Amino acid sequence: MPTTVSVHLTPSDKVALKRHLRTARSERVRDRIRALLMMATQLPLVQIAQGFTVTSATLINWKHRWLKRRHFGLADAPRSGRPSKADARYVKELLRVVRRDPRELRYAFTRWTAPRLAQYLGEETGVWLTPQWITELLRTHGIVWRKTKRTIRNLQKRAATERARKALQRLKKGL
């Protein structure tokens, strides 16, 4: 096994890789890009492999994939297995529903939770997913899911709340 592997990157290659590094969604693709950039600086192969916790053979494989197919060679190949239950139609419905107020759909609650979304979408689409998978789907589409805070702020009338706040301010000032 060689101690270093040289990857000759042109300045335009480096710019393209760095741009792809910022836009790549997959951490695995970003690791491959970083490894290529490190190989271009002539770092020892063992050092790069330890940094990414891969073998030297894997790094050489990444280099060959880059040389053969450029950016397309960095992406993961399709994997075998059962297709996801959450097809494009399901994800579209999930994103549409999560952006709506549940009260518009005649629910008494004001915030969606992952279990509520799983239940609602299961009844609507017939596809039953776990709340954890719903959370993961939302995360992949840029929606961060947090634990619901218990509050009644959304049930209050803004005008009445503002009047009460101003009255409290006047009382504090002694007017």
Image (tube, rainbow, N blue to C red):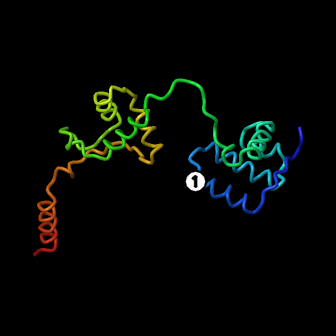
3 horizontally vs 48: left or right = right
Residue at 88% in and 44% down: 3
In what quadrant of the picture does the N terminus appear? Answer: top right
Corner quadrant of residue 10: bottom right
Corner quadrant of residue 109: top left
171 horizontally vs 35: left or right = left
> Taking 64 as reference, is 158 above or below it?
below
Amino acid tagged 1: Thr
In what quadrant of the picture does the C terminus appear? Answer: bottom left
Q: Nearer the viewer, residue 89 or 142?
A: 89
Residue at 64% in and 35% down: 77
Q: How many marks?
A: 1
- The residue carrying pointer 1 sits among few (fewer than 14), some (14 to 19) or many (20 or more) residues within 10 Å by Cα, namely few
Residue at 19% in and 38% down: 107
62 horizontally vs 87: left or right = right
149 horizontally vs 32: left or right = left
Extreme residue toward the front, this view: 69
> Taking 150 as reference, is 174 above or below it?
below
Q: Nearer the viewer, residue 166 or 58?
A: 58
> Residue 126, position in %: x, y?
33, 26
Q: Secondary structure at mark 1?
A: helix
> Residue 168, position in %: x, y?
14, 66
Mark 1 lies on residue: 23
Extreme residue toward the right, this view: 2
> Taking 106 as reference, is 40 above or below it?
below
Corner quadrant of residue 115: top left
Residue at 85% in and 50% down: 6
> Residue 36, position in %: x, y?
75, 50
Extreme residue toward the top, this view: 82
